[in-house]
Image: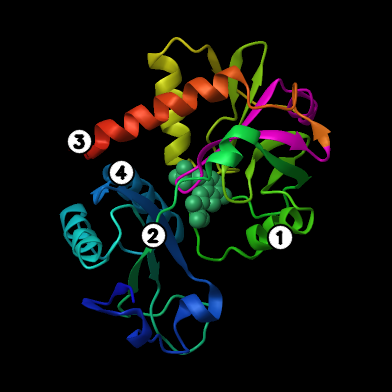
């Protein structure tokens, strides 16, 4: 049984209850974060808390805690759950109030944190790569906010599940934005291409790590708009997220990507990422 945090208290998940008038339930009015924990250490906590603040600012909700308070409560949740590697899900809504679209006055937010075991992607998928499909990005234009209202992402991701694929890669006005729940990189002629961070995609924490590793290891990269045509003619496609780490997309809409196998840049970045994680586990929580 997992232990969660709800509005100041730790409790078994089965005992946690939210009033039906919570604005998260009624309007999807809230923001979230997902932070990986390796060997009970928070991975890139300050980057995640910085992005959380950006999400709070984006929906005009006051951050209820300081970074030190967040760290303290997240560490309590980690300590009260069993596995060494965890994914921490933090969720803050605009609280409980009579249903009215306008913001309620003087209403405390609802703060919820849960932990799930964090499982590394299966070895066979790292070796084979995964399938993805493409779809039109029909989400709103504040995709930089990690909003809990994820209905478009849910519908888009399900298209992949229906097609026996792992992710839906999104195209807006002819250009790659990201995946339904991940960031996407393209490799062409040994250059790693990354779409620029803007309001049309979530600024992934794993995305940042990948670009840092590329810069430190002389992997050529460019941050620029990537056309659908470039995506479809890529030598390699990479998918990144806190839970999937780095994976190679080897099939796109039933076409082979490159030679249909995870490529050299995937292998190099995957190895560098594992090494970086191991450094974090040795004690550096930056
Ligand atoms: N999602 N883009 C979207 C739309 C995402 O939902 C995610 C992650 C990412 C990657 O961000 P990061 O590297 O910080 O995990 C990009 C998480 C894992 C989720 O919603 O479960």
| Nearest the eye: 254 or 45 | 254
Up-down relation of residue 155 to residue 43 (above or below): below
Q: Which residue is mark 4?
A: 43
Secondary structure under badge 1? Answer: helix
Q: Is residue 260 left or right of residue 60?
A: right
Q: Which mark is residue 117?
A: 2
Sequence-earlier tag: 4 or 2: 4
How far apart, in angstroms, are the residues tagged by discs 3 and 1? 38 Å
Q: Name the residue furthest front.
A: 124
Secondary structure under badge 4? Answer: loop
Q: Which mark is residue 282?
A: 3
CB at disc 3 and ligand 1 closer than 8 Å: no
| Magenta range | 228-254
Q: Is residue 184 left or right of residue 73?
A: right
Residue 185 in view, yes or no: yes
Up-down relation of residue 88 to residue 36 (above or below): below
Instruction: Name the residue rendered at 65%, 35% in the picture.
Output: 128
How far apart, in angstroms, are the residues tagged by discs 2 and 3? 20 Å
């Amino acid at each position: 049984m997992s232990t969660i945090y709800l509005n100041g208290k730790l409790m078994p998940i089965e005992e946690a209850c939210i009033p039906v008038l919570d604005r998260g339930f009624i309007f999807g009015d809230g923001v979230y974060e997902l932070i990986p924990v390796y060997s009970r250490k928070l991975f890139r906590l300050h980057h995640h808390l910085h992005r959380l603040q950006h999400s709070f600012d984006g929906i005009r909700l006051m951050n209820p805690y300081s970074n030190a308070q967040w760290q303290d409560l997240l560490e309590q949740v980690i300590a009260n759950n069993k596995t060494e590697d965890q994914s921490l899900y933090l969720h803050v809504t605009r609280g409980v109030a009579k249903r009215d679209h306008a913001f309620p006055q003087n209403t405390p937010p609802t703060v919820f944190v849960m932990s799930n075991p964090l499982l590394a992607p299966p070895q066979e998928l790292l070796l084979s790569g995964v399938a993805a499909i493409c779809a039109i990005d029909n989400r709103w234009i504040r995709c930089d906010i990690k909003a809990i209202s994820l209905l478009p992402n849910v519908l888009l991701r399900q298209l992949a599940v229906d097609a026996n694929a792992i992710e839906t890669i999104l195209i807006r006005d002819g250009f790659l934005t990201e995946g339904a729940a991940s960031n996407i990189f393209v490799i062409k002629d040994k250059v790693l291409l990354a779409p620029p961070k803007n309001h049309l995609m979530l600024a992934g924490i794993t995305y940042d790590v990948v670009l840092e590793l590329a810069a430190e290891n002389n992997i050529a990269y460019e941050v620029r708009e990537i056309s659908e045509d470039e995506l479809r003619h890529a030598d390699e496609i990479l998918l990144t997220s806190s839970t999937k780490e780095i994976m190679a997309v080897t099939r796109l809409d039933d076409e082979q990507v490159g030679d249909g196998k995870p490529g050299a840049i995937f292998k190099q970045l995957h190895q560098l990422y594992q090494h970086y994680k191991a450094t974090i586990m040795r004690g550096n929580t930056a």
